[in-house]
Image (tube, coloured by chain):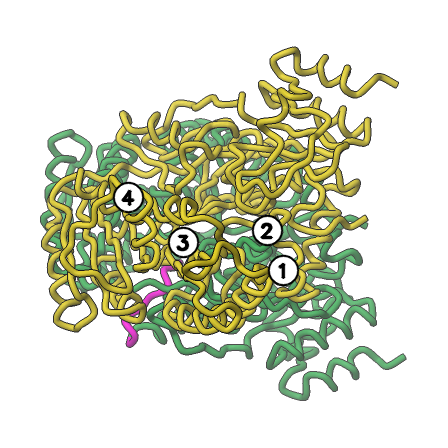
Chain colours: A yellow, B green
């Protein structure tokens, strides 16, 4: 029998196979919690090479761990066993010609999200997924984790934007589902199933994505809200009055704003008032005939009359809009610079956000009095990044990390929501899923895994416990 | 062993079990092509009864065929074997209270789509699925077939609008996935997988659906286009200039209009010009500040200047809007009244519609010269209901039905589209799927079926060939 490393080198050539220290940059996850040294890192140049690598690993009894930009927060893209090969899609970065009349484009799995945004700009088209990691995250990883981001409430998550897929299966065969239509009901929705499957059912190698025309005008406002309940009410009002324009509806707290302003000295807060809760509203329109500033301005007036909005400002330029967004987007960085932190990726029905925030605070302060709670996220879909910093004067969480996670997960579950909103389960949340979801649900997932990957070689230990 | 009919009667009570002539109305499909007499029709009143019925059928070795409004066009909701029980969801019609702040509602599977629309109206909310059969189609069947309709290009198909599901599995266990959030990445997307699975993986008993605020104003126009290519170009222009308002973008041909006007004498066509291709444009906005008529009017002017639009009229009242829509919606009825017909449910990338229409006409006229082609459908998602009537003076298709279907399916496949856009495979299109899709794809579907329904008792002969 051929040495598997010799076989893999033969398939991939010298540029396509990294081992030893060269494999180091691929080894650990972004939060540096997971990852052992793999046999090596395969960097295939095309689908045929991916298929050949999977076949070779299968023959050699090696596990396969697909990796995109390695920006995941749940450890799903690194190996936890030494007999694994990481398959990095980072060399498969071809971007096809966009089809403006159909609103679609074909891309390889290794395309970086920001590179796609850039490639589309001159065509007047956009791919409406925006998230903090877009400068590194790759399409295959975004599909694997079913990424959402700030515009998901309006345009959908990856699963809503993937028209077609090409996937290398665990036996090395290639499923060519590269169709370019939304409406395809010829059997089960395989394309949807692979979204969010974290590389455990196959490796996505190409996709056809849905595109939208770029807007021709924008209007943005930064608002101080009287409380979280006010933010929820105002969000519902905006959806009714101007839902078709909403391109962002982000909330954050004064805890997060304070951390960001403290650690990022070039950030500037320009309103006169501070409050407990802030809302960043962005509207966009394809029509220049829409009085977008008026629409946003009168919504603000209504909010002030109702006592929901305490203070606010419309962005008077693109530069000011960018400043508003930085106040929101630099919060994870501000909190990271503060020191140790705990991240929770919660969703609840949007109408229950305020109730969750209140219940969560009670739970967390019972677990560790004074813990600093920094909830921020996407009001439109109820997605709360519920992050914690230790109490003032403490550097750690007194060993309470699991207690926080479990309490918050149970609370979100009770409210009809999720403890894994848009980051996936990866390795980090399998036990949590087993506790918070029914045995029926978990068993169905094991059966799916078993149907597509009976030997359990595809990203073992991610999404579901191995059926073996 | 208990007689299974006695057991089923015991579970369901006298109102819940129909047999003999009482079962007759449930026996045949809407197009009267499929259906043999089943053992009986179960009409459970709740999820527990559905589960008990499935368990009893399993014990007795009977197949289970779920049925909603029985409006499907592919024969997926009737039995083709005598040892089957039809499970009609028609008694499970509870509609929950809508949650306006979250934009969601819980419904039982037997709720008729039009009843849901009606229930939402006083709340200022809408469920954005509209299709011809909405007066009879039930939510469970719409989920099972992953229905689309005229607004799918804007708001999505059922799979995009289902937040949560409850499903009775083949072993009688109940999967409670009744969560009310868009963002839930805790493992594989089971909720998406059941959409379009045609009752072959389980029986949907409840769902949580996504709602949108009702618009506050509408503008509609009926246009005569210079040709199909012009309709495609104008559609792309509208998506760019006014995409956020589009609530309908329906095309039809003069063949269909002629059939409708001939057979429905109360229909009126009010423009001066006739042409080969018509476009029905509907826009809607949640804001009263949007100059919707101006936006639509100037788009029309642009289209006329470009030579794309030959003639057109804006609806000046709700009554006129309804008349415009009837011209489109009565076409299936007009064609039905004309006599024998063949229906094909095609999708191609929207930019390829004109190319498909041209290629399809060539193929069809080679097969049967003079055949009357009536393509109509949804420009925004490339969904073409490509229906045929025999040539003038003929009553039938000269035995060429299969030849038409295969030629059109192959052509749509070549263009990156589908031969089963929004009606599903049912029983009618399994062989077509086996021919037009790769063995890899069909095999993955068989594996899914086998994973969820190893005994093959759930709607056998639908979606996939039985794995047994």
Cβ–Cβ under 8 Å for marks 1 and 2? yes
What residue range appears in magenta?
Answer: B122-132
Judged left or right of residue B369, residue A51 is right
Question: On the same chain: label 4 and label 2?
Answer: yes
Mark 4, other Cα within 10 Å: few <14 / some 14–19 / many ≥20:
some
Residue B150 is at least partly visible in this image: no
Residue A243 is at least partly visible in this image: yes
Q: CA distance from mark 1 to mark 4?
A: 32 Å
Reading the image, the residue beneath label 1 is A432
Q: CA distance from mark 1 to mark 3?
A: 39 Å
Q: Residue at x 41, y 44 (%)?
A: A337
Residue B180: within the magenta? no
Question: On the same chain: label 1 and label 2?
Answer: yes
Give the number of the disc on residue A447: none
Q: Nearer the viewer, mark 1 or mark 4?
A: 4
Q: CA distance from mark 4 to mark 3?
A: 40 Å
Reading the image, the residue beneath label 4 is A326
Reading the image, the residue beneath label 2 is A425
Dot 2 falls on which chain? A
Lower sequence index among marks 1 and 4: 4
Q: CA distance from mark 3 to mark 2?
A: 34 Å
């Amino acid at each position: 029998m051929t040495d598997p490393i010799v076989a893999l080198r033969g398939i991939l050539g010298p540029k396509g196979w990294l081992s030893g220290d060269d494999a180091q940059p691929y080894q650990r996850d972004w939060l540096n919690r997971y990852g052992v040294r793999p046999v090596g890192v395969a960097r295939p140049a095309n689908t045929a090479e991916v298929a050949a690598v999977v076949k070779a690993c299968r023959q050699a009894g090696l596990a396969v761990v697909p990796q995109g930009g390695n920006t995941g927060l749940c450890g799903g893209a690194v190996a936890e066993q030494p007999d694994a090969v990481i398959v990095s899609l980072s060399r498969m970065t071809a971007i096809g010609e966009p089809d403006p009349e159909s609103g679609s484009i074909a891309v390889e799995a290794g395309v970086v999200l920001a590179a796609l945004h850039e490639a589309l700009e001159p065509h007047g088209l956009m791919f409406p997924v925006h998230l903090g990691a877009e400068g590194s995250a790759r399409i295959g990883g975004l599909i694997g984790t079913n990424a959402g981001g700030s515009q998901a409430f309006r345009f959908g998550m990856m699963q809503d934007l993937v028209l077609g897929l090409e996937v290398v299966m665990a036996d090395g065969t290639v499923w060519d589902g590269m169709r370019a239509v939304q409406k395809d009901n010829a059997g089960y929705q395989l394309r949807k199933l692979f979204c969010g499957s974290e590389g455990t059912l196959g490796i996505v190698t190409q996709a056809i994505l849905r595109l939208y025309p770029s807007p021709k005008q924008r209007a943005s406002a930064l608002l101080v809200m009287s409380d979280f309940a006010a933010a929820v009410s105002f969000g519902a009002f905006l959806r009714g009055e101007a839902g078709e324009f909403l391109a962002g509806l982000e909330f954050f707290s004064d805890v997060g704003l304070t951390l960001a302003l403290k650690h990022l000295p070039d950030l500037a807060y320009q309103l006169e008032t501070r409050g407990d809760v802030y809302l960043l509203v962005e509207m966009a329109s394809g029509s220049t005939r829409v009085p977008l500033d008026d629409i946003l301005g009168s919504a603000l007036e209504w909010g002030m009359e109702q006592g929901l909005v305490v203070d606010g400002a419309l962005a008077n330029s693109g530069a000011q809009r960018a400043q508003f967004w930085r106040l929101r987007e630099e919060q994870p960085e501000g909190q990271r610079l503060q020191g140790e932190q705990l991240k929770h990726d919660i969703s609840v029905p949007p109408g229950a956000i305020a109730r969750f925030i209140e219940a969560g605070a009670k739970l967390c302060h019972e677990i560790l009095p004074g813990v600093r709670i920094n909830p921020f996220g996407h009001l439109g879909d109820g997605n709360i990044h519920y992050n914690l910093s230790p109490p003032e004067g403490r550097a750690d969480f007194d060993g309470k990390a699991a207690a926080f996670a479990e309490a918050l997960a149970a609370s979100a579950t009770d409210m009809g929501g999720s403890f894994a909103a848009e980051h996936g389960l990866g390795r980090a949340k399998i036990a949590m899923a087993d506790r918070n979801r029914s045995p029926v649900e978990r068993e169905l997932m094991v059966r799916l895994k078993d149907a597509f990957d009976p030997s359990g070689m595809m990203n073992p230990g991610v999404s579901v416990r191995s059926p073996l």
